[in-house]
Amino acid sequence: MVDSSIVIPTHVPIRTCVGCRNRAIKSELLRVVVGSDAHGQPAVCPDPRGTAPGRGAHLHPASECYDLAVRRRAFSRALRLTEALASAPVRDYLDSLD
């Protein structure tokens, strides 16, 4: 006899971190999108709820992955932009988590 009260997820979304390039469950990663900084300039902004419109990229919420992404210029590439973006809003958000 099979117990029908057990729910097995049929699909768990997997994403790749732009920093370390490791795959993880979407809920473990921080989504980032293109937005604007405090001065109105284009910047990479955190989207913790994952509901902002537009193309997004995913990042482990750790300073190591953030540093790798900045060093590799991965944000612009993942968000398909030609110009470099400020990433200070993401750094500030990660610092607020600690």
Image (tube, grey):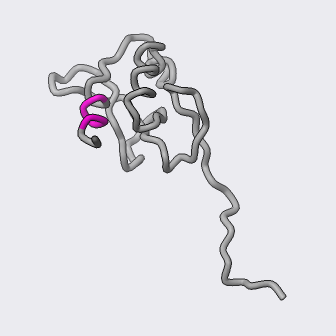
Say whether residue 47 is left or right of residue 29: left
Task: Give the quadrant of residue 66.
Answer: top left
The residue positioned 48% from the left and 14% from the top of the image is: 72
Q: Residue furthest right?
A: 1
x then y, percent, for residue 4: 72, 83
- 43 vs 22: above or below: above
Say whether residue 80 is left or right of residue 91: right
- 62 vs 71: above or below: below
x then y, percent, for residue 36: 25, 27
* Magenta stretch secondary structure, dominant: helix
x then y, percent, for residue 33: 39, 33
The residue positioned 51% from the left and 24% from the top of the image is: 78
x then y, percent, for residue 61: 40, 38
Q: Nearer the viewer, residue 44 or 63?
A: 63
**Quadrant of the snapshot with the N terminus:** bottom right
Q: Within the magenta stretch, is there residue 92?
A: yes
User: Count the marks: how many?
Assistant: 0
- 3 vs 66: above or below: below
Say whether residue 4 is left or right of residue 31: right
Q: Residue furthest bottom?
A: 1
The residue positioned 58% from the left and 34% from the top of the image is: 16
**Quadrant of the snapshot with the C terminus:** top left
Q: Residue furthest top?
A: 83
Q: Within the magenta stretch, is there residue 62?
A: no
The residue positioned 46% from the left and 34% from the top of the image is: 59
- In this picture, which residue range is highlighted in magenta? 91-95
Task: Give the quadrant of residue 11.
Answer: bottom right
